[in-house]
Amino acid sequence: MNAREILEALNGPADVYQREAVQAAMDHPDEVVPFLLEHLEEVAREPDRFAAEDYDSQLPAYAVVLLSHHKVREAHRLFVDLLSLPDETPFDIFGDLVHEHFPAALWKTCDGNVTEIKKLIENAEANGFCRTSAIRALTFGVATGGLVREEVVEYLKGLFRLEEPSWSDGMVWNAAASALSRLWPGESMEVIRQALDEELIDPGYIGPASLKRALEEGKEARLDALRQRSQKELAEDPHQAMEWWACFNPERFDGMGGLLGAPGHGGRRTGLQKNAAKRKRQQARAARKKGRRKSR
């Protein structure tokens, strides 16, 4: 298959996993990568077209997974731009790929430079789930040795001092506390406890009991567990990442309804359809909490 044939296959029926084309794209990156980048540039220029209900292709998802597999540095800024699209647009286009694959994709394509990742984390206009994916990307950096743990810890602690809290900061604070726990929360406990007291963190997301367990587990054990989980996620190839999706295997997901047809569980719109109510509740809770935030 040449590059054009690969792209045509990847742009084929959304309910058929294009294994041959995916493998060809894995085997011939020099030929295919420019076309994948061009496609995501088009998505970034005209997101509404690709977020539309009648858009029926997995090509944007294929492009993200393949470009991250090849660690294409030029894709990094594109990924950040796509995750910075307003409101639910990233979920309309990519579904659960936003939080299931983009964290690893951001790290694998940044070449150790997390400037753009931090810009996304701090972007109050971006969807809160996209910002939390960027936080997870930082933990991959620590797990692989590409980032210094202590520097990431200090950065995450600083997120609790945001000057202009937005509706999505509640999710960012939850994700920051969770990341600090995975990195071992020892030197962060004062900040986390204060955030819990001020109701910046949802105790149902991460509470005193789980933090206590993390402390008792010890730094090296926590970091070792993080390294093991991260190694597995970062080593996942495109076939492992995609071929199990429900849209490609409807017989295995019979009766799961909203899970059919969205990246992360199988195709388009899983997260948007199945989890929309849950996200709205989280967003509303975050909005209430920001009003109770004390200035530091």
Image (cartoon, helix red, strand yellow):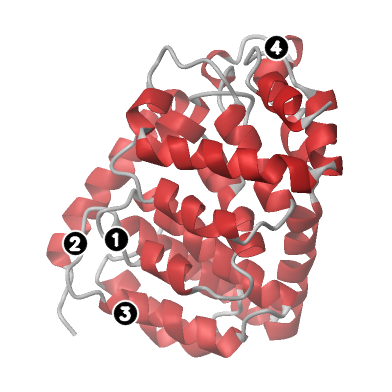
Q: Percent position (x, y) of residue 278? A: 38, 35
Q: Residue at x 34, y 70 (%)?
A: 196
Q: Nearer the viewer, mark 4 or mark 3?
A: 4
Q: Percent position (x, y) of residue 62? A: 65, 34
140 with respect to 168 (left or right): right
User: For residue 169, which numbered disc appears in the image?
Assistant: 1
| Amino acid at circle 3 | Gln
Q: Nearer the viewer, residue 141 or 56?
A: 56
User: For residue 194, which numbered disc appears in the image?
Assistant: 3
Separation (CA) of disc 3 from disc 2: 14 Å
Separation (CA) of disc 4 from disc 1: 36 Å
Q: How many marks?
A: 4
Going from N to C along the chain, the mark reached first, 4 or 3, is 3
Q: Nearer the viewer, residue 242 or 207?
A: 242
| Amino acid at circle 2 | Lys
Q: Quadrant of residue 237?
A: top right
Q: Are marks 1 and 2 in contact (CB under 8 Å)?
A: yes
